[in-house]
Amino acid sequence: NRLAQQLNIITTELQTDIMTTRMQPVGSVLSKFERIVRDLARSQNKKIALEIIGKDTELDKTLLEAIRDPLTHLIRNSVDHGVELPEDRIKKGKNEEGKITIRSYHEGGQVTIEIKDDGNGIDPQRILEKAIQKGIVSSEQGPKMSARQILNIIFMPGFSTAEQITNISGRGVGMDVVKSNIEKIGGSVDITSNVGEGTTFKLKIPLTLAIVPALVIQDKNETFAIPQINLVELVRLEGEESRKQLEILHDSEFFRLRGNLIPIFRLSESLKLEQQAGTNQEDDFINIVILSAEGRVYGLIVDSILDTEEIVVKPLSKKLKNLSFFAGATIMGDGRVALIIDALGFFNTVDRGHGQKADHLLAEAKELQAYGNEDQEVLLCSLGDNRNYAIPLMLVNRLEEFHSNQIEWSGDQALMKYGNIPMPLINLEKSLKLKGLSMLESIKGNEDFTIACVVVKIRNHFFGLVVDSIKDIAISEGGISSDSVDRNGLLGTIFTNQKTISLLDIHGIIDMQKLGKNVYSKKQNGNNGRILVVEDSPLYRKVLKDFLEECGYEVALASNGREGIDFLERGEVVDLIILDIEMPIMNGWDCSKEIRNSNKKYSTVPIIAISSRISAQDKAKGLSVGFTQHLEKLNKEEVLKSVSNYTNHR
């Protein structure tokens, strides 16, 4: 053992020394761009300063040669397309001298090189128009694309926004070559851009091609290696219920990873591996390797996960080069050959056997996610009776831990200094009349005690809900059942993680406290107006209704756009419409468009659109279909402020 350990140390040192010999600073390549930028700027009558940061960052010599041409093209692109003429920059309030920054640094076992300019930026709308004009994107597909997807169109073959061909750009080749050359060496290219502010290209490059850290897995007694650069995490489902945690939708398997629905592939089925004699196929656990390839996240089910190793990559023979499943091969310590799985190649070519490629499955997962329970997230916590309870996540402001010596008492009321104001701490066990000792009662006389606290902001005041422990974030499966409510302080029960959980009525619990002479209590302002809430999530519908009613509004509910239209066509009068975007039967876009195109009196009613994610493209589309305002769904304070603004001017 001692000799083997000594030999291992010597070989590791030898490997490190050889690798170090191959490494060279990237400054040897980057420094040459100073002259390129100077000459190009002079030929275009522009003033551009080049800043290079991280010249000492080291990279394998062969990779330095491989990235020289892609970097040159990106720099020329920034000078030609990015930085404006001095007179144009002055008109925009910028310094007449543009700036291009090249920054290199180590990150996550890779070298990252950023090329950033402070120029025009890239207009997604112009990219989309050109793409539709050239037939790269269909007119039906265009409006459904996100800003990120539109920006990535510039990497497609033959795409260019240049109006004329010059010796610098507009020759119909370029960005697609940059992308393919970087991907050939196992790297990736990402782009971010803000119109009028500038563009950043981020290149991620492996330190070396000779040795790659990889995860070794086995399936049907065949050994494979997966580069760690593509590895996100490992998931193990155990017990008899493990297979039930995989969701079957349209004959395809999906797994809900912390609320996100991702497609799942079985490696043995995709590669058509046969079961070996003497192996047991029926296990009470499932291993899922979660991979990411160019932003596409998916899972591979494998029999076993062995270990992580640094492998030497060997090229595939000519007969196997056409198999995009694999990026190469390696020889393991026992002499067996293991194929290296190409995460992107696998995703692009895998077929589920019913004509559905992986991209279609990913799109399907996103669509199902949009119409699923993404906004019905709850925070699970336990109380003194050793049972789990749920709090709507949209009401949670922060999760905190407080030491007992930070807590002060005013009579029987516990207080905590939060910011510059005293925050009441609420005894949930006492409010719900539960059996069992509460955490607040436990800290009395105990100088060394830590409590878990869920901070909520209700009616512009902070409250601390003291819990026994904070468990997890879960997804509510279905609606709220109020049939089993046996006490004040509970909204009802929900079904999550195969269990029934009681959902806390936070507003009701705070009203029970009768704090500060009703300073925090429910407002009684009479009827401030009538609001139609169109929302498919039962949980959010319930919370928003209670929230608006306690602020003095009369609330009518609809679970989708068609129900909302039917409600209005019955002649019902409303002062405001709150409209969710992602709904079944009729979504928010179509509902708003139909309301605005009608000749009835409600066609001028203010419409506040709410959604979980808002992009600039969404806001532009919202204006075109008649949204008065577009807000983030979970920002209750902003929603209430807008509601008050529009109903006060009715």
Image: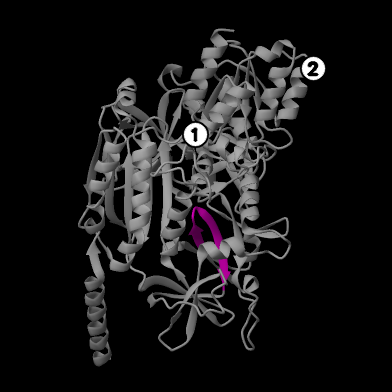
Q: Residues within 10 Å of mark 1 (few under 14, many from 20)?
A: many
Image point (22%, 56%), residue name: 27
Residue 311's place in the image compared with 204, above or below, is below
Quadrant hosting residue 145: top right
Residue farthest top in this picture: 649
Quadrant hosting residue 454: top left
Image point (21%, 76%), residue name: 17
Secondary structure, mark 2, is loop
Q: Where is residue 66 in the image (x, y as percent from the top left)?
A: 36, 62
The colour scheme applied to this rendered structure is one colour
Q: Position of residue 260 (x, y in %)?
A: 56, 50
| Magenta stretch: includes residue 294 | yes
* Residue beneath disc 1: 395
Amino acid tagged 2: Arg
Q: Residues within 10 Å of mark 2 (few under 14, many from 20)?
A: few
* Residue beneath disc 2: 570
Secondary structure, mark 1, is helix
Amino acid tagged 1: Leu
Give the residues drawn in magenta, as a range: 290-302
| Magenta stretch: includes residue 453 | no
Q: Position of residue 130 (x, y in %)?
A: 56, 37
Quadrant of the image for the N terminus?
bottom left
Determine the main secondary structure of the stretch shown in magenta.
strand
Q: How far apart are marks 1 and 2 (CA)?
A: 34 Å
Viewer-nearest of discs 1 and 2: 2
Does 162 sit left or right of 245 as displayed? left
Does 259 sit left or right of 586 as displayed? left
Quadrant of the image for the C terminus?
top right
Q: Where is residue 341 in the image (x, y as percent from the top left)?
A: 51, 70
